């Protein structure tokens, strides 16, 4: 084994050992759909400045969402009930009373000048943080001028904590004027009082280093006080989340059961296991020995990714786990790229050993793997930092999945396959090794060499027709928004006999609402949440439950608002738009603008087609669909990047050839990789669609359509678009890669250089 592979083996062992330790020692956080959680009902109250109505309650809901995100409670749910109530559901919260205390604070943060004289008009006396009375003037700065807040160790507090605050708008200039005036005074008048909800939390003196009349500049400051770590983090969450427009009061707190039953979870788990096994069998059938070792590396990928999710405290939901299982299938992509490259090397140089060909294959596949990973990481990072709620959680899962797949393919799989081919060279040279030569699809394409780009007008016309049909469906039939986006009705029942929650779900489904959210509430009540429930339909639901539970009494019946409100939707769209712009910029820098535009336009084509299919079928657009759509976006861009990486390489080697001819050859050479990667994911999705139950059927259907459309668009939309757009490009063809030429001449591990 070469020195490089020894290093890879040591790293692989260290990563696997660390992942196994985290998996065995840290429990996973499960979401509301898998474990349930704590439900807190809040009621908004009138204040002197605002009336508690539907509008102010919706604004309070957005503020609470920001607070929950800052506290680190992922995948939570907040819905408005009626005009003045908010239902907060927190998954896997260990201390609900602490969370409730943070929710209930109005968080009116203000900064005041301090006076040493008796209170004058507009001033008042208040106790500072140590209990000593001080006189403060009118508020000079309010929470509207604060943009960000974070907890940090106080560098001068001997281990204490502080809150770093960044200002926005005129907040920085206001703080500068306030501190400039205080710096000219002495004694108490040199202090500034930071007041939260009428209580002084800190009243520090402006330090002597701040010049009189100058103040603290830079648009940021630090609040210090007798803060512990928990107090500083809570204060930062309150400050950054903003002030509630109206006060809220906790009127109820209870435990709620999972929104999915054990039967649905078990069915989804069985589907996942069957799908992964089928994917592994497919890869073994195609690539034999190296395929078997890549499948073993996939098990390592699953362990690494799961350990990373546990380590960062991510909340696992059923759609998230389904996406995780799908990522296991798609993580084979990097291996497929390397294996196909190795087959090409053996076909080009018949005397080359499988081990040498595989080493070159991994090296040459790296550029496509790296570019695909970077574009996906850019999207995942922007979704995490700019979005919130489930979109932010998806960004975490996506980022961890990409990093885990890189470790699996470029570390685990490479070590295993190199070691096996080194110990069994004769097996590697046979068909059982999996690298004997070009596969059937490649041989067929090489024999026929179809000129796909000659009919680029036809392919672009078909893509435009698909988009037109999708847009027609969206506007003519409309989108069937789920309860997360539209709100609906929440009805809570008590029964005279105990009813198992799975039985209750079946009863509600038989009444005509198979997608209703049915869960236990409190001790033994049953809550039903769905959209489009009129009084006659509600009566049917009640009668269906009565057949199973005897006498049924209605405990609560309220209209609820959406759990994914307007602000969250706007943030998600902004994050997605910025992610697309950044991806386009990256692809333009790494490739050329025509390639980047082709990839992004093909991705938009895929999104519109999948959305149009759901519109024509009348399927709900909900949080599960949103997760599927984000997955499709990543898959589509990755597919196009792989094609364009091959086109760039071929064009650099043939700068004088017509670009359409080069693009056609690049698309044809990547078809085997595209088909094999897509089939690996299709097995898992088909199992989820057939066996996963109603909870995952739509998720699997969306991704099946998305993978099919994405496979089409990478060859028949993105590539023809690049050919058309390249006419307007004045950038010269790329230069040949010197590294590739050097690697071809270099002896790889196990290659004696002899040719028979």
Image (cartoon, rainbow, N blue to C red):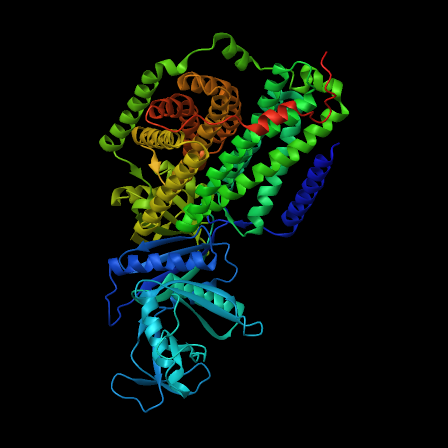
Determine the residue located farthest toward the bottom in the rendered image.
118
Q: Residue 524 at what x, y percent from top left?
A: 45, 53
The quadrant holding residue 434 is: top right
Nearest to the observer: residue 55 or residue 715: 715
Q: Residue furthest top?
A: 447
Residue 577 vertical position relative to residue 688 in the rendered view, above or below: below
Instruction: Give coordinates of residue 21: x percent, y percent.
Output: 67, 48
Name the quarter where the N terminus is drawn. top right
**Nearer-the-camera pick, 535 or 456:** 456
Tell me where residue 42 appears, x and y as whole percent: 36, 62
**Residue drawn at 64 percent across, 36 percent down:** 411
Would residue 555 be visible to someone looking at this image? no
Number of marks drawn = 0
Does residue 491 show up? Answer: yes
Viewer-proximal residue among 187 and 87: 187
| Depth order, front residue of 71/91 | 71
Q: Residue at x 40, y 66 (%)?
A: 218
């Amino acid at each position: 084994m070469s020195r490089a592979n020894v290093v890879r083996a040591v790293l692989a062992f260290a990563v696997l050992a660390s992942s196994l330790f985290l998996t065995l020692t840290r429990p996973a956080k499960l979401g509301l759909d898998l474990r349930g959680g704590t439900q807190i009902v809040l009621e908004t109250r009138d204040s002197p400045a605002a009336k508690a109505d539907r509008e102010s309650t919706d604004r309070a809901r957005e503020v609470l969402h920001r607070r929950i995100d800052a506290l680190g409670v992922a995948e939570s749910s907040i819905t408005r009930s009626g005009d003045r109530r908010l239902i907060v559901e927190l998954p896997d919260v260990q201390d609900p009373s602490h969370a409730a205390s943070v929710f209930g604070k109005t968080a009116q943060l203000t900064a005041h000048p301090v006076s040493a004289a008796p209170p004058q008009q507009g001033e008042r006396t208040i106790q500072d943080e140590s209990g000593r009375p001080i006189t403060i003037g009118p508020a000079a700065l309010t929470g509207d001028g604060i943009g960000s807040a974070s907890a940090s160790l106080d560098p001068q507090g001997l281990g204490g904590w502080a809150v770093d605050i960044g200002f926005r708008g005129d907040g920085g200039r206001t703080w500068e004027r306030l501190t400039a005036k205080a710096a000219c005074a002495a004694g108490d008048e040199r202090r500034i009082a930071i007041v939260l909800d009428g209580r002084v939390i800190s009243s520090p003196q402006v330090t002597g280093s701040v010049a009189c009349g100058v103040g603290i500049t830079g648009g940021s400051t630090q609040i210090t006080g007798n803060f512990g770590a928990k107090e500083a983090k809570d204060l930062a969450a309150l400050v950054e989340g903003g002030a509630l427009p109206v006060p809220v009061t906790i009127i109820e707190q209870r435990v709620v059961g999972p929104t999915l039953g054990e039967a649905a979870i078990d069915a989804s788990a069985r589907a996942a296991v069957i799908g992964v096994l089928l994917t592994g069998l497919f890869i073994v059938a195609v690539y034999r020995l190296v395929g078997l070792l890549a499948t073993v590396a996939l098990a390592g990928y699953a362990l690494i990714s799961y350990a990373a999710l546990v380590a960062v405290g991510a909340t696992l939901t059923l759609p998230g786990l389904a996406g995780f299982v799908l990522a296991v299938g798609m993580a084979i992509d990097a291996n497929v790229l390397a294996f196909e490259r190795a087959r090409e090397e053996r076909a080009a140089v018949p005397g080359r050993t499988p081990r040498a060909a595989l080493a070159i294959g991994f090296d040459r596949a790296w550029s496509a793997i790296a570019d695909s990973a970077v574009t996906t990481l850019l999207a995942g990072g922007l979704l995490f930092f700019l979005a919130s709620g489930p979109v932010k959680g998806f960004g975490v899962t996506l980022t961890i999945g990409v990093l885990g797949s890189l470790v699996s393919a470029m570390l685990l799989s490479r070590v295993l396959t190199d070691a096996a081919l080194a110990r069994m060279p004769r097996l590697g040279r046979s068909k059982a090794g999996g690298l004997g030569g070009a596969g059937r699809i490649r041989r067929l394409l090489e024999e026929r060499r179809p000129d796909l780009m000659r009919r680029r007008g036809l392919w672009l016309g078909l893509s435009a027709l698909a988009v037109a049909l999708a847009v027609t469906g969206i506007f003519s039939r409309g989108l069937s928004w789920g309860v997360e986006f539209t709100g609906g009705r929440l009805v809570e029942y008590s029964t005279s006999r105990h009813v198992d929650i799975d039985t209750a779900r079946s009863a509600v489904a038989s009444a005509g609402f198979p997608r209703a959210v049915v869960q236990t509430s409190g001790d033994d009540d049953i809550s039903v949440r769905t959209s489009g429930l009129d009084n006659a339909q509600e009566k049917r639901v009640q009668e269906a439950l009565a057949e199973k539970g005897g006498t049924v009494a209605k405990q609560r019946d309220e209209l609820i608002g959406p759990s994914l409100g307007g602000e969250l939707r706007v943030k998600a769209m902004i994050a997605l738009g910025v992610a697309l712009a950044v991806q386009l910029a990256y692809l333009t820098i790494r490739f050329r603008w025509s390639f980047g535009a082709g990839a992004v336009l093909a991705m938009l084509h895929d999104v519109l087609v999948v959305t149009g299919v759901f519109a024509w079928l009348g399927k709900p657009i909900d949080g599960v669909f949103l997760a599927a759509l984000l997955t499709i976006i990543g898959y589509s861009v990755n597919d196009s990047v792989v094609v364009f990486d091959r086109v760039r390489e071929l064009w650099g080697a043939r700068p004088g050839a017509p670009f359409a001819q080069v693009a056609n050859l690049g698309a044809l050479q990547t078809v085997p990789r595209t088909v094999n990667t897509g089939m690996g994911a299709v097995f898992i999705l088909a199992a989820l669609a057939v066996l996963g139950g109603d909870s995952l059927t739509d998720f699997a259907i969306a991704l099946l359509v998305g993978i099919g459309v994405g496979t089409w668009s990478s060859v028949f939309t993105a590539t023809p678009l690049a050919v058309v757009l390249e006419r307007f490009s004045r950038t010269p063809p790329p230069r040949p890669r010197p590294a590739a030429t050097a690697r071809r001449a270099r002896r790889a591990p196990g290659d004696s250089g002899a040719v028979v």
